[in-house]
Image (spheres, rainbow, N blue to C red):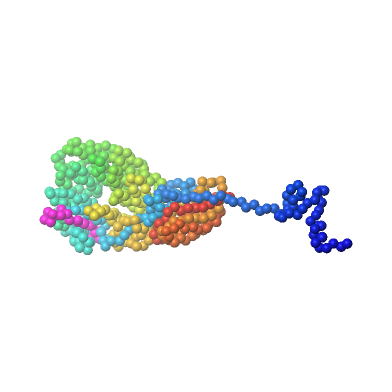
């Protein structure tokens, strides 16, 4: 008899396999009487879950390391960090120049305080050297009220110091033309027998100076009278320094001694009491030439730049600092200055094509932290110390005005390009290929972030927000690099990379 469809299906469901009856069960297979599960040939899919890891730069204050290969830097170190400050551990604006109303014709500006006996108060006075006509201009208040000091002209910017002479606060200006004593009334008296002074310092009521010409002697004035340079056992005189240290270029008073910076060394003069008790000793011999215009007393130490790098001198020993920035600078005409707890160094970078000072370093002498700025062409510093506080004036190429050095990130309103770039790091797993899945950025201002591996890169834009922002990356590589850039303000903290190992 012919079977119906239902009977045929039932018959199909009952079969003998190796002498055993099997039953249909729900699922992908069958179960026999013994309870054994049998596959129907369809395999289960297995999902492999890769564990994610995070690399984040909790503290960026290590700044830039231009000496080590970028492949061996940790994730929080930068192979490039220009025009950004990382002193706080986050990235913020580096230094720049804020405009003033002072014309850049004034190559050097001096500030001093003169006590007015009539009004019984201190007068805050300015003196400025005008490089156009060689004149000295001065006065109180704003520059357009300054008047010229008659009878005083210098061929190049003089050096100067405030001194109380015969009960009056005066300012002593010195150069190749000799010395000029400038009174608060802006009248001046010249001292024709003063030597050709190139640098000076006041020490134990005498002026000590290096001079032009045969530069192997330190000259000193009479005791209590820096206008008397007559060589005499009871008046002024000079100390000759022989040896292979080269010319005498700079003198500073520090720690109870006069230190003399030569082309290739440092000497110390003990100048207490009478001339006959003066003594000289050599302290340091440099393998590279010392740049005299970078020597500056910075609290309890002296900082200076030599051909082989930046040094700190404590009066006894000399040690290198900022070694991680070796190789960035290339000679030129560097200048240095100390103001408000920081050492400022303007110098020529190795990338400069015209030999100008295109790089500004700001060094904290205590912590040795350095902020590197590029694209600021400072040719002269003028520190100003007022009762209201300190500020540093700077003259720069191409600008019509004198600027104030600030952590503003711009030059007269034109923003400097800011860039922080990590090394090409393997994130501690050199043996593993990785998927760079996501990046997280906490930024106060708009910026762009480029993520690179050895196989390619992607660029992302971020807006300034109070919350952490995320971007999906999906790049494959064994190494990764972050580059954070902006032409505006910078304010980035804790950049983070989420990755998985393959």
Viewer-nearest residue: 209 or 30: 30
Q: Is residue 186 left or right of residue 17?
A: left
Residues 82 and 57: in front is 57
Q: State the image quarter where residue 417 is shown.
A: bottom left
Residue 296, image x and y in percent? 29, 47
Residue sitting nearer the eye, 260 or 245: 260
- Name the magenta segment's main secondary structure: strand
Tell me the residue at 29%/46% (across/down): 298
Residue 125 sits inside the magenta stretch: yes
In the displayed image of the protein, which residue is found farthest to the right? 1
Coordinates of residue 240 in the picture (x, y in percent) = 23, 40
Pick the residue in front: 364 or 361.
364
Looking at the image, which residue is at 14% across and 57% down?
A: 185
Expressed as whole percent of the image width and height from the top left, the position of residue 281 reads: 26, 37
Q: Is residue 245 visible?
A: no
Q: Residue furthest left?
A: 118
At a point 21% along the width and 57% down the height, the residue shown is 126
**How many labels were placed on the picture?**
0
Tell me: 467 left or right of 473.
left
Return the x and y of residue 1 as percentages of the image width and height: 88, 62
Looking at the rendering, the stretch of residues picked out in magenta corresponds to 115-133
Q: Is residue 320 visible?
A: yes
Is 166 contained in the magenta span? no
Q: Residue shown at 33%/45% (left/top)?
A: 366
């Amino acid at each position: 008899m012919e079977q119906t469809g239902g009977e045929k299906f039932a018959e199909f469901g009952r079969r003998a396999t190796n002498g055993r009856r099997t039953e249909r069960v729900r699922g992908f297979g069958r179960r026999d009487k013994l309870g054994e599960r049998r596959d129907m040939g369809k395999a289960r899919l297995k999902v492999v879950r890769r564990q994610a890891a995070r690399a984040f730069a909790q503290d960026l204050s290590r700044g830039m390391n231009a000496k080590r290969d970028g492949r061996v830097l940790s994730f929080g170190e930068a192979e490039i960090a220009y025009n950004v400050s990382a002193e706080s551990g986050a990235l913020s604006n580096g230094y720049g120049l804020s405009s003033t109303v002072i014309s850049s014709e004034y190559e050097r500006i001096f500030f001093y305080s003169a006590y007015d006996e009539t009004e019984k108060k201190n007068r805050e006075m300015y003196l400025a050297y005008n490089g156009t006509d060689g004149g000295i201009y001065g006065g109180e208040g704003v520059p357009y009220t300054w008047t010229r000091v008659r009878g005083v002209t210098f061929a190049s910017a003089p050096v100067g110091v405030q001194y109380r002479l015969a009960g009056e606060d005066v300012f002593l200006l010195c150069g190749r033309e000799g010395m000029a004593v400038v009174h608060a009334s802006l009248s001046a008296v010249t001292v024709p027998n003063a030597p050709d002074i190139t640098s000076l310092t006041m020490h134990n009521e005498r002026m000590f100076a290096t001079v032009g010409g045969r530069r192997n002697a330190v000259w000193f004035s009479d005791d209590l009278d820096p206008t008397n340079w007559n060589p005499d056992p009871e008046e002024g005189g000079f100390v000759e320094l022989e040896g292979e240290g080269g010319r005498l270029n700079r003198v500073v008073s520090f720690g109870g001694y006069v230190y003399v910076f030569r082309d290739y060394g440092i000497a110390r003069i003990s100048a207490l009491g009478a001339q006959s008790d003066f003594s000289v000793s050599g302290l340091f011999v440099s393998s590279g030439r010392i740049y005299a215009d970078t020597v500056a007393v910075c609290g309890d130490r002296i900082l200076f730049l030599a051909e082989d790098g930046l040094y700190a001198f404590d009066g006894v020993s000399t040690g290198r600092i900022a070694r991680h920035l070796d190789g960035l600078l290339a000679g030129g005409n560097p200048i240095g200055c100390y103001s408000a707890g920081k050492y400022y160094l303007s110098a020529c970078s190795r990338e400069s094509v015209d030999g100008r000072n295109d790089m500004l370093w700001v060094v904290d002498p205590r912590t040795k932290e350095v902020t590197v700025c590029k694209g600021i062409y400072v040719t002269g510093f003028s520190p100003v110390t007022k009762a209201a506080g300190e500020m540093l004036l700077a003259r720069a190429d191409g600008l019509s005005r004198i600027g104030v050095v600030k952590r503003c990130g711009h030059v007269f309103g034109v923003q400097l390009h800011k860039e922080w770039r990590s090394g090409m790091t393997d994130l501690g797993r050199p043996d593993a290929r990785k998927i760079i899945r996501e990046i997280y950025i906490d930024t106060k201002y708009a910026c762009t972030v480029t993520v690179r591996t050895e196989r390619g890169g992607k660029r992302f834009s971020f807006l300034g927000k109070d919350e952490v922002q995320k971007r999906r990356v999906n790049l494959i590589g064994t190494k990764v690099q972050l580059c954070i850039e902006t032409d505006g303000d910078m304010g980035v903290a804790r950049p983070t990379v989420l990755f998985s190992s393959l």
